[in-house]
Image (spheres, grey):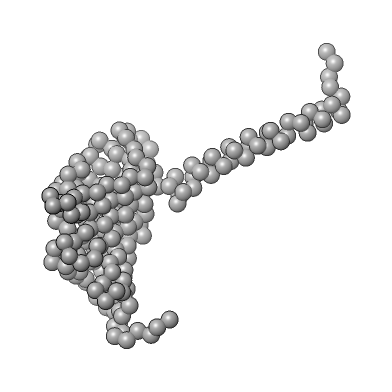
């Protein structure tokens, strides 16, 4: 058997290199897609537990009997585990719609939804970079930040025992613990409350 000469090998390499490079680039692109998209690959739950289904790009809306929306829930990915009937959420955003006034929006990096999908039974736990946002009557925005928050969906209540910061156009508040009652339209700071108030904030 005659082996190819060096010039022949060089010509073969130059011929195959573009195709190999193209395949390699496609593999790297797909790998980047699987680990990109807001870091979804890092939001997986620990291995070893069986799930029965998952959804990407989930959007769920609940309506009152009169057709008025009560809340919406979105997530980049949902993985449901039959054990404990829970769903692990990646990048969840939850919005309550009151009968009057502006919506209350909750978002986080990860979360867990407990229940069977019925509004009365659902309990939402949000974790990591949790933000509560609402547009106030004067047009300014209230923004509360904490590391973990629990929401009782049907009761329209939420609470946390973690440190909280609250900012609006005229004030900055800090607290350990917070409770919200949407039916009463109340937001209560619980312990070690301190802050500052500026009734005439300077314009940027």
Q: Is residue 157 rendered to the left or right of residue 20? A: left
User: Which of the image's four quarters has the C terminus?
Assistant: bottom left
Rendered position, 23 above or below 74 = above
Q: Is residue 155 left or right of residue 85?
A: left
- Residue depicted at x 17% and y 51%: 67
Q: How many marks?
A: 0
Q: Is residue 118 visible?
A: yes
Where is residue 25? Give x, y as percent.
62, 40
Residue 164 showing in the rendered view: no
Name the residue at 34% across, 38% down: 54
Height in image: 158 above or below 4?
below
Left or right of 102, for residue 75: right
| Above/below status of 119 relative to 146 | above
Tell me residue 128's x, y (percent). 35, 57
Residue 49: name its quadrant: top left
- Where is residue 112? Give x, y as percent: 28, 48
Q: Nearer the viewer, residue 177 or 32?
A: 32
Residue at horizontal 83 percent and vertical 13 percent from the top: 1
Q: Image point 29% across, 83% down: which residue?
A: 197
**Residue 195: percent from the left, percent from the top?**
29, 79
Query: Residue placed farthest to the top in the image?
Result: 1
């Amino acid at each position: 058997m005659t082996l190819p000469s060096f010039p022949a090998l060089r010509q073969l390499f130059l011929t195959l290199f573009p195709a190999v490079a193209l395949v390699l680039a496609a593999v790297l692109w797909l790998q980047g897609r699987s680990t990109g998209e807001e870091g979804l690959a890092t939001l997986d739950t620990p291995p070893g537990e069986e799930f029965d289904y998952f959804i990407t790009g989930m959007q769920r809306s609940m309506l009152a009997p009169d057709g008025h929306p009560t809340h919406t829930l979105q997530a980049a990915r949902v993985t449901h585990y039959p054990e404990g009937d829970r769903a692990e959420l990646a990048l969840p955003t939850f919005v309550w719609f009151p009968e009057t006034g502006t919506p209350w929006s909750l978002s986080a990096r990860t979360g867990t939804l407990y229940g069977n999908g019925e509004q009365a039974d659902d309990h939402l736990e949000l974790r990591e970079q949790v933000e509560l946002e609402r547009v106030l009557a004067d047009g300014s925005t209230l923004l509360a930040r904490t590391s973990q928050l629990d929401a009782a969906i049907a009761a329209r209540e939420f609470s946390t025992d973690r440190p909280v910061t609250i900012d609006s156009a005229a004030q900055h508040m800090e607290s350990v613990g917070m409770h919200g009652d949407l039916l009463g339209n109340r937001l209560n700071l619980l312990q070690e409350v301190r802050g500052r108030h500026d009734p005439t904030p300077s314009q940027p």
